[in-house]
Amino acid sequence: MEKLFGIEMNVLAGILSGGTIVVLLIVLLLALRNRVLLKLALRNIPRRKAQTVLIVVGLMLSTTIIMSALAIGDSVSSSIRTTVLDAVGETDVRLESPITARFGDDYLDASFIDRVRDGLAGDARVDGVMPLIREKLPVLNEATDKTVSGTFVVGIDVGSLEGFGNLKNQDGDVADLGAVGAGKVVINKSLAEDLGAGIGDEITLVAPSGRTRYSVIEIVENKGLAGGDGETRSSAVFSIEALQGVLDREGQYNSIEVSVVGGLRVDVEDSEDLADDLQIAFINDEAAETLFKAFKSPVVIDALQAKIDDGSATGRGPFSSNSLDELVAELENNSMTDEFKIAATDTATLAIVGGVIEEIGDPQLAQSLLVPMSHLVELHVVAIKNRGLDIAELIGSQITLIFSIFGSFSIIVGLLLIFLVFVMLAASRTTEMGIIRAVGTKRRHLVQMFTYEGIVYSVGAAALGTVLGIIASIVLVQIMISAIGSDDNFTFTYSVTLQSVIVAFSAGLFITAITVAISAYRVSKLNIVVAIRGLGQEFVKDETPSAGKRVKTALRWLGGPLTYTVDTWKRRKTGEGWVVRVVLNILWLLVIVQNLAAIAAPDLEDSVVAKAVTAAIVYWLMIFIWKMFKLVQPWLASGWPLLPIGLFSALIGFHPDKGIAGLANDNAALFMGGTTLMIIGIGLIMRGLLERRGYREEFQKRVSMTFIGVAMLIFWGLPFDALEGLTGTLSGGVEMFLLSGVSLVAAAVWVVMHNAEVIVWFVSKMTGRFGSLRPVVKMAIAYPMAARFRTGLTLAMFSLVIFTLMIFAILSNLGSAIEDDPDLVSGGFDIRAEIDPELPIDDVYAVITASDGKLLASDFKVITSQAQLFVEARQDGADDLAFKGARIRASDDAWLTSNTFRLSHWDPAYGSTTDEIWAAIVADASLAVVNGALIETGGFGGWEPGQGPTLAIIGIKANEPGEIIGVDITIRPPIGQGAGVSVNRKVIGVLDQFADAFEFGSGDIYMNPAVLEELSTKPVPFVDYKFRLTDSSRTEEVTRLLETVFIEHGMTASATVEDIKDNQAQSNAFNQLFQGFMGLGLMVGVAALGVVSFRAVVERRQTIGMMRALGYKGRMIQIQFLMESGIVAVLGSAIGVGLGTLIGWNIFLAISAETDGLKFSIPWLNVMIIVLVAVVFSLLNTILPARQASKISPTDALRYE
Amino acid sequence: MDNGPIISASNVMKTYRSRDVVVNALNNVSFEVQPGEMVAVMGPSGSGKTTLLNCMSGLDSIDAGDVSIAGQLLRTMSDDALSDYRATSMGFVFQAYNLLPVLSAQENVELPLVLAGASQKIARERASEKLELVGLGDRTDHLPAELSGGQQQRVAIARALANDPAIVWADEPTGNLDSTNASEIMELLVRLNNEQGQTFVLVTHSEDVGAVTDRIVRMSDGVVISTSDATHGSSSASNVSSGASTNI
């Protein structure tokens, strides 16, 4: 992977490891200044080995999760990378005709290759140029009667092999590709296996001109020229002359490929530069000049700039490179630049410019530009290897992102665990720490001591966590491989990069160290007397300075960094903490400088000074805001300041349509966060009132905290759109998922912990019948309830983990509607097939009749065919007039009348049933149906319409299914192709989300075939065939027979039911991988319970002894410990399952508002397994400490005072 | 059983080994206590007092010899049986009180009752009764941390008495208390001994404490060196025979 969260991995690794080193150096510096503290800290480490191990284990889990998320991303991206590199081989840049085969002739004549060769003569970057033919054609082995319908056939120019021919044969030697020629072919491993062909065997190529035979002279690896493409691996390499012969293309080829020096290695910049140079060489300067002049009107530039600024015109999608901003920037120049030419070659950009020119009211100009636009590019140049790697990179980082999002819950839990570990470590040392304080050390010395010790643990934990993360990811990837490994087109392999390891280690160390420092700070606030007497008090409140003092501090800090510097200067005399302050001061400056560098780096021309000032002000403000917070903090507890703060924040969150103009900024997180603050504020005010009325403290707390918890549960548990009427539709991203999960769990734990008595009562009632258990239950409840902070934290961790697992279990169960009704996806067709467009079928039934009885016409109920045409389209009368990508699915009457897909929207003017709508399409060529991806989604999980590179229809909303008013659209061939005319259609229906999912293209428009002749000057072949069988139990057999009977047309067929199963299996495999990953989080929760139990044994030695003296049996002590963990595990599971179901249901509501046919069901088996695993592992983890506890001898325990 | 000793130890040996040092904590100790008697075991630190108490009460195992309580040999009893026996028939009071910090005074006293299988209602009644008995009827809902040392020790005594045990073992019951509190506690113990007729075995190094008991057993270096009728101040070997003394 090269990027994560949009940041280069190299940079990320650099920043993180640099930061880590700086932190470690500071700590080291401090430690050396006061070695006694260091000594004290370090001697604590080997004192209790078991405890040290436990701490390191507790601290490492966050790192483990980060590491495995990164390694999984690495594996995915490296696997795709390998696949891409295998397929592209030595080719770095590919040149092709801008015309596509559907609309015209995509073959090139000899003049182009000569021009490319001349242009590149003497270019040191290039080590090979080759004209090629690439086609898909059927190949068969008559001896074995095996066929591969869509074999990737390549015709190579044996005279141009230099720089390309480095393919190994089965013996590991370099194969002699030059030996291909008349009657001789080299095939790859996949094809050899599929055909059952060996060296010397004859294979048959089926081409439009008939069959020809070739003898196999070599079998090579699936790479490079014999690497196939992303879909098809089976490949055969012929001489270009041989293919020209059978395809009737004397002297022609359809691709020119250029290899950059370095073989399979990628030189990204050289390839990109080379591609640009070549592109400029194949641009029609006259056409470019015309466009430049036309675009360079101030009106056009302003309109384009406006498009860029409001973001509505960006056609940038993951797979398209939009160059509008570059184009506009180049228009600043007085004469045309090469950069302008490059920017103008992007068809999506040209389409946007065309749209803009029309929008500003000059349709004539727009029309007149079509001719220069269509002549602009002679050859289309693509840095193909770079593009492939970009896609690999994109998918890899997306996967990491998904894993990181879900993993962040586990990471949070892991951090809570670190906190818990340190609080308990401190608890075990309170007496010691009290004494250390009593002899005169300062509070910060305690912080330092703990931090030193913690850093040592953190380094160990980060290292161990990284190693374990790698191991965990290996296991997970193996699970994934074993689930999908059968596909030979894509090899999934494990891989991890050094950067990922550095990032995981540093990030892990960094967050661990920070958490350790925060814990140390909390811990240091102990009351000396309380500590020495060993009275358990996990936290002591801060002393609050008087209001006047706080105001003074706040005012002083108006000076921001200056105040700090002055302060530091003043302190130089006393020397107290001076060095630390100076270091911090310098660090501060460094941070500012570094930020400046980062801000300035992307564009050095901008004023560095301006940015420096901005950065300084930001830091200044941050300090001031912090001090202001400290000023009001003591009053916060009374609740009332939270009301205005919360209200303000919530109002900022409103959608501008509903909220106060100028303030409302459409932010879900702010709205939810602000409202939460208000709830907390009201709760605290309630507490104050109760206090004034003289109620007992416990009662005040219970009432107010329960109110806060319950109110938060209700608020965060509302369906996502429940408050839309009030706030408008708010936008929120991933952070909302995290925020809602954490808030809900916190609220639930809050309520439970403040109403523990209810649980005590309930458990006592439950176990009351078992008399002998009562004393055990009593103690098993008393301890967790006495240490509420610890118990609450553990409970929260456990609940959070189960919560995420639960949501995932529910979501992965939603898709099952397809299993119940496969017709939703398949349209009721048993088999779907594709043929070679070069080998069209005139009459399907004629071929079947001529099949010597292999197939009979009576085997089929329905046979349908469809043609595809990639076009550009736009919605008439929309704000955005740019044409965008779309795909026409011209369907014959049989398809239109016999498919069983469902419509989610329809225009009642044309019919009120699905059949009537389709009948209207058959009868009227001006009507169309689009698929569900083209309409507006409610913003949940989808992108806003108009943002993508494909056609989007505004005004039809996915979450408002039912009747619509037809929408007019205009369709035209891509610029410079086809008949050069545009056609109009009215969209009268929308397919539901499942429909045609196998052939899903994001811009599909279904209509009757009349469109083909209107748009294309040459006949468009029908390539997609669907079969509905008389006897669907014969599906498998007929699928095979179809491929044989239609071999002359290169048909590949597959059973839709099988496809559904395969799909299901693949998503199951992914789910498994994911659940395994989430299971790591479960490990954290389980570890937490283990840590708590181990700690409890040590802490309670004496009381255990006393209990034994009182007559508790060893077994009873053991049961008590198990019960303590069990209660937390069961309670945590209950909270997690409950809240997970609630949010799962909310997510389901949001999705099903746009997609029908989804069913909500709780996967009970899955849930039971999750809960069972969680509880059982927690108990297993407690068994050891519990046994230890039960073995404590009463006299030993009581002897220690 | 009516007339026999309730506690009887004969030739008890107990040895602690730490690293290379072997400490004979109890060296051939024999010792009897009659029902209803209040006995103080005294001696300097390290003389084996606490070990003797632990071994006789069955909290700790012995290396040789025999201890029987109410005629039953401890070494024939399993750990579970011993636990049950402790729960129903013994009470313990320690120097450090050793109340369970997470339970209120009331709950601490209820615990042995609950352990012995009493219903919640009865446990509550009896516990209140015992707290009343030790003079803490108004502190029942307080946690140990909220009580003074003397009060905590009273709770511990109430807890020890909860089941009306036959024997109450007390290890330095006044060790952590000032003299006023200490004498109050001792008065309480003596009163309980007189009123309830339970057997008390006290370990102490305080002569004041010893003075109020029926009999003082003195120990040194793991052997019983003398036994005296505390109330009368005269020495007798009537109820005690020490291996060490016979060897001299």
Image: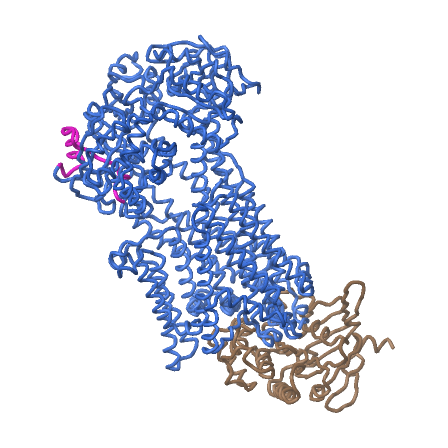
Task: Residue at 37% x, 36% y: name it.
Answer: A321
Above/below status of A1034 relative to A650: above
Residue A121 place in picture, x, y as percent: 48, 20
Residue A605 place in picture, x, y as percent: 44, 46
Q: Does the magenta segment cover residue A918? A: yes
Residue A195 vs residue A1033, the one in the foreground:
A195
Quadrant into which the C terminus of chain A falls: bottom right
Q: Is residue A352 visible?
A: no
Above/below status of B138 relative to A625: below
Q: Does the magenta segment cover residue B141? A: no
Above/below status of B49 relative to A52: below
- The residue at the far front in this view is A334
Residue A1105 place in picture, x, y as percent: 63, 69
Q: Give the drawing colour for chain B.
A: brown
Task: Residue at 46% x, 48% y: name it.
Answer: A404
**Magenta segment:** A910-936
Residue A305 vs residue A224, the one in the foreground:
A305
Q: Is residue A952 visible?
A: yes
The chain letter of the blue chain reads A
Residue A424 placement: quadrant = bottom right
Residue A370 placement: quadrant = top left
